[in-house]
Image (cartoon, rainbow, N blue to C red):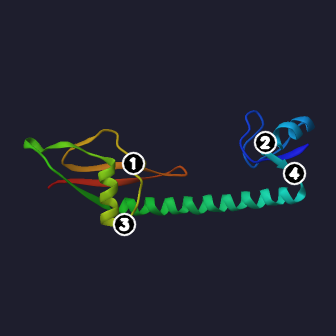
């Protein structure tokens, strides 16, 4: 019996996939638990339309991520911090502070979890940080840490 999975089913397939399942397994397990629906021509057409819409949305989001990456190459974000003697900061500049400064100065909203810091920023200067924007797109962000 051909069925379209509504959720991921271990050992069978992923959501939205058309699979061939034994009649008993489909009738007694998949269909009553709403894990799958019968593969009628109407349901198959609906599945194809949803797949097409999902791919179009992913392409649009990837294009947007690439546009943001291009913007990030051009700009430098200034972050101010308090420091003690010798140019050492009290604490460190966090990803949250960088994300907030980026939003305030440039209007670009990026989640703090997408900013990758290899080591904490604990002194003044200019740093280049990697920003993972999703869909295998990453950009480079210049951060300038200055004294308050």
Q: Do the residues under discs 2 and 3 have CB atoms within 8 angstroms?
A: no
Residue under numbered circle 4: 39
Can you say which quadrant of the picture contains the C terminus? bottom left
Q: CA distance from mark 1 to mark 3?
A: 19 Å
Mark sitting on residue 33: 2
Residue under numbered circle 1: 130
Assign a secondary structure to mark 3: loop
Q: What is the C-alpha distance between the residues marked 2 and 1?
A: 44 Å
Distance CA(mark 2)–CA(mark 3): 46 Å
> Where is residue 22, by image quadrant?
top right
- State which quadrant residue 103 falls in: bottom left
Q: Quadrant of residue 120?
A: top left
Q: Residues within 10 Å of mark 3 (few under 14, many from 20)?
A: few
Q: Residue furthest left?
A: 85
Where residue 63 sits: x, y (%)? 55, 62
User: Looking at the image, which residue is at 89% across and 54% down?
Assistant: 40
Residue 71 x %, y %: 40, 63
- Callout 1–callout 3 Cβ contact below 8 Å: no
Q: Nearer the viewer, mark 2 or mark 4?
A: 2
Q: Residue furthest top?
A: 11
Q: Quickly name the residue at label 3.
A: 107
Give the percent coordinates (x, y) of residue 90: 16, 43
Tag 1, which secondary structure?
strand
At x 76%, y 33%, the residue is 11
In primary-sequence order, the first of circles 2 and 3 is 2
- Residue 102 lies left or right of residue 31; in this view the side is left
In the image, taking residue 98 as reference, residue 66 lies left or right, namely right
Q: Is residue 28 left or right of residue 78?
A: right
Which comes before the other along the chain, label 4 or label 1? 4
Helix, strand, or loop for circle 4?
A: loop
């Amino acid at each position: 019996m051909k069925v379209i999975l509504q959720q991921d089913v271990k050992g069978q397939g992923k959501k939205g996939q058309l699979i061939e399942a034994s009649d008993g397994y489909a009738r007694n397990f998949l269909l009553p638990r709403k894990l799958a629906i019968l593969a009628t021509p109407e349901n198959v057409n609906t599945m194809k339309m949803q797949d097409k819409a999902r791919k179009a949305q992913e392409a649009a989001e990837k294009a947007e991520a690439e546009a943001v990456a291009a913007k990030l190459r051009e700009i430098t974000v200034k972050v101010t911090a308090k420091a003690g003697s010798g140019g050492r900061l009290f604490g460190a500049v966090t990803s949250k502070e960088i994300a907030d400064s980026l939003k305030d100065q440039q209007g670009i909203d990026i989640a703090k979890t997408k900013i990758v810091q290899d080591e904490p920023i604990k002194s003044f200067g200019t740093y280049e940080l990697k920003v993972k924007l999703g869909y295998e797109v990453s950009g480079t962000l210049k951060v300038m840490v200055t004294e308050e």
